[in-house]
Image (cartoon, helix red, strand yellow):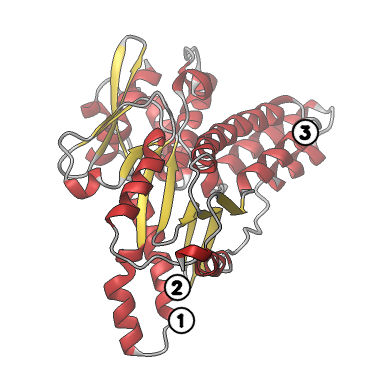
Amino acid sequence: MALFNKLNTPVFLKEVSDTTQYINRLKELQDRATGKVKDDIAREINLANYGEIGEKNIAFELKNSGMPMYIIHDLRLEFEELSAQIDYVVVTRKLVFLIECKNLFGNIDVDNQGNFVRKYSWNGRTIKEGVYSPITQNQRHLDVLKQMKRADKKNAITKMLLDKHFGDFHKSIVVLANPKTVLNVKYAKRDVKDKIIRGDQLIQYIKDALKKSKELTNSDTEMEEWAQRLLALHIPNQTDYAKKFEDLIDRVTNDSEKEAVIEKTADSMIDKASLPPVVEKPIIVNETMAEYLAPADNKETLIKQLKAYRLEKSREENIKAYCVFSNKQMLDLIDKMPKSRDELLGVSGFGPVKAEKYGDVIIELLK
């Protein structure tokens, strides 16, 4: 069959992502917005742009691989109550790779328990904080795909075969797209080391995996059919996440009292919104985190800084903003002004886990 295979370059079956459409919509709204709403939209665009940069870095590597493969960007799956947003699905003649793109700032250490710790310098200090495992996140994506395929099997034998061999054909990779990130996996277990790489290692990783694989080589037609079956599973995201900003803009008038109401509503909606997963990428401290690293001179500024930090962490961990800390807990933070992790434990809603995870940055913000 190899004699009849002519494909020798990558082919994108789906290249546009929800992020691109989201950014374009926000830019249109930004031209109409004023005041705080305009500032909120600008911040949202910065966050989305940074996530998109990481994905474009991966696309560049794939496009220039010189390998026969079919690529699906931003594949969204739904199965029963589960959902998954996969940054890239790469279908080759032997294997399918599910790629989770992480554009993390700072340096990343992975210990022998699989915990991810990020380190970065800030105001002369070295900050260490835990990061939700992208390997676990991508494994959940893989599990959703497996359950969807399993549901299509008609009898116990085919289900058993899928359970046994699914992992032979489908591989999970976490790719760190920020070229400045230093990855230290010295103490990580082998299965973790094998699933996380830097962006410039991606193509060699795929080549090595294909070389080691003992699976049969598919023809051009079989490879394309495999990719098309995966693309057919895509469920477009119908939620208009930018509509909250459009509704605010439509209500803005020159009346100062109404403007104050709009600003309050904008804060509330940003806190409660369920934002798209492709915007959940981490951001660079010296660019997009600048707003909440500014000196805090009063309560209003502290609230603004804490909300910005909360928003960034919620995107990074793919959780609701109030799961980091609620508005009530934020006000308790400002009221008690903890100066250490022990004092932070006295704040409503802060136990040992949250204190360990978010404590250093919060304490620094409150100084």
Look at 35% across and 84% down and name the residue there.
Answer: 158
Look at 48% across and 42% down and name the residue there.
Answer: 65
> Considering depth in this image, is 37 or 5 the residue closer to the camera?
5
The residue identified by callout 2 is: 148
Image quadrant assignment for residue 330: top left
> Considering depth in this image, is 84 or 335 the residue closer to the camera?
84
Kind of residue at disc 2? Met
Q: Describe the element under mark 2 as helix, strand or loop.
A: helix
Q: Categorize mark 1 by other alpha carbons within 10 Å: few (<14), some (14-19), many (20+).
A: few
Mark 1–mark 2 CB contact (< 8 Å): yes
Q: Vertically, is 72 above or below 279?
A: below
Q: Vertically, is 300 above or below 115?
A: above
Tell me the distance, in whole angstroms, between the alpha carbons under discs 3 and 2: 49 Å
> Considering depth in this image, is 201 or 34 the residue closer to the camera?
201
**1 or 3: tag closer to the N-terminus:** 1
Kind of residue at disc 1? Asp
Relative image position of residue 74 (x, y in whole percent)? 55, 52
The residue identified by callout 1 is: 152
Look at 48% across and 48% down and name the residue there.
Answer: 67
User: In the rendering, which numbered label is found on residue 258?
Assistant: 3
